């Protein structure tokens, strides 16, 4: 009788341990997928304009734009998404096309997101993310 109870307890422990390992593996896989989806690469930026909003934070962390030359920004991010809007919802500033690079980041919820980069004398002076 005691032997059967010991076997059942052992089986329960093995099952509980197996479930714990499975849950940990699922969490690790989900974390890896999330990190991959939110990690900047030039290839991702150039090939998935509608998904840029997911990687823009990582890009800005890895490549601080302020102080970069306009040519370096274009080499990194490609040609701007021309004919974009010159005014945006959150900023009350108007962005003249001759001193601004505008990149479409995609649609998050219902708003089009944009990376707006201001240029002065060929150097990035500021940038922000805004919506239309």
Image (cartoon, rainbow, N blue to C red):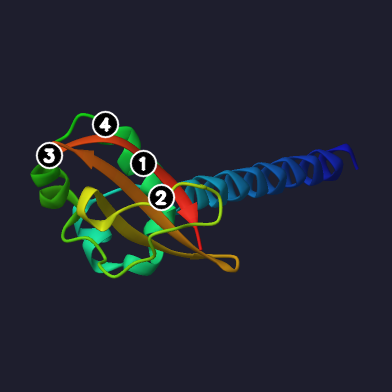
Residue topped by disc 2: 38
Residue 58 is marked as 1
Mark 2: few, some, or many residues within 10 Å (few <14, many ≥20)?
A: some
Residue 9 or residue 62, whichever sits in front? 62
First of labels 4, 2 by sequence position: 2
Q: Nearer the viewer, mark 4 or mark 3?
A: 3
Which element carries disc 2, helix, strand or loop? Answer: loop
Residue 53 or residue 39, whichever sits in front? 53
Residue topped by disc 3: 122
* Callout 3–callout 2 Cβ contact below 8 Å: no
**Image location (x, y in percent) of residue 100:** 26, 50
Which element carries disc 3, helix, strand or loop? Answer: loop
* Callout 4–callout 1 Cβ contact below 8 Å: no
First of labels 4, 1 by sequence position: 1
* Callout 1–callout 3 Cβ contact below 8 Å: no
First of labels 1, 3 by sequence position: 1
Mark 1: few, some, or many residues within 10 Å (few <14, many ≥20)?
A: some
Residue topped by disc 4: 66
What's the distance in space between the residues labelled 4 and 3, CA to CA?
Answer: 11 Å
**Image location (x, y in percent) of residue 4:** 83, 45
> 76 left or right of 21?
left
Q: Residue at x 48, y 57 (%)?
A: 88
First of labels 3, 2 by sequence position: 2
């Amino acid at each position: 009788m005691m032997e059967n109870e010991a076997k059942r307890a052992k089986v329960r422990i093995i099952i509980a341990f197996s479930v714990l390992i499975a849950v940990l593996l699922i969490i690790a896989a989900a974390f890896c997928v999330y990190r991959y989806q939110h990690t900047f690469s030039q290839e991702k930026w150039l090939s998935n304009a509608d998904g840029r909003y997911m990687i823009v934070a990582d890009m800005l962390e890895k490549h601080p734009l302020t102080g970069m030359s306009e040519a370096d920004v274009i080499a990194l991010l490609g040609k701007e998404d021309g004919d974009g809007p010159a005014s945006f919802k959150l900023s009350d500033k108007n962005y003249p096309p001759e001193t601004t690079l505008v990149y479409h980041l995609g649609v998050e919820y219902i708003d089009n997101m944009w990376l707006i980069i201001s240029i002065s004398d060929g150097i990035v002076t500021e940038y922000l993310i805004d919506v239309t």
